[in-house]
Image: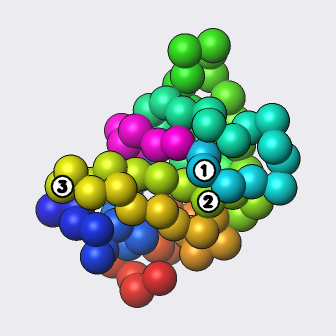
């Protein structure tokens, strides 16, 4: 079960996310459902189509158990199968 405490060691595909801080001001506020994940990128299904966004240059907001959790992208820049089950 994904909780606010262990989200960094779980699968992100299927979760809704929003970029709340970025080195690129044009992507702040971008939100949607994560449909794919690689070591350094999320592919997000947004209202304006599919976008591939780098993890490391952004802070990501997830809503888990009715709480907003903000994660620095640099903390999750690993391949999904390397991160799952590991402490981030």
Residue range (magenta): 13-18
Of the 4 image quadrants, the one containing the N terminus is bottom left
* Residue 14 position (above or below residue 64): above
Few, some or many residues within 10 Å of mark 3 (<14, 14–19, 20+) = few
Magenta run includes residue 82: no
Q: Quadrant of residue 51?
A: top right
Q: Residues within 10 Å of mark 2 (few under 14, many from 20)?
A: some
Residue of label 3: 65
Q: How many marks?
A: 3
If you read the primary sequence from the N terminus, does the residue marked by circle 2 or circle 1 appear first?
1
Q: Which residue is mark 1?
A: 20
Q: CA distance from mark 2 to mark 1?
A: 6 Å
* Marks 3,2: beta carbons within 8 A: no
Between the C-alphas of marks 3 and 2, the distance is 19 Å
Q: Residue at x 27, y 57 (%)?
A: 67
* Position of residue 66 measured from the top left corner of the image (x, y, whole percent): 21, 51
């Amino acid at each position: 079960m994904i909780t606010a405490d262990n989200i960094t060691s779980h699968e992100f595909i299927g979760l809704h996310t929003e970029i709340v801080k970025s080195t690129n001001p044009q992507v702040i506020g971008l939100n949607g459902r994560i449909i794919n994940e690689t070591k350094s990128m999320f592919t997000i299904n947004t209202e304006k189509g599919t976008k591939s966004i780098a993890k490391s240059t952004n802070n990501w907001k997830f809503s888990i158990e009715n709480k907003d959790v903000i994660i620095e992208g640099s903390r999750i820049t690993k391949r999904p199968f390397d991160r799952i089950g590991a402490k981030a």
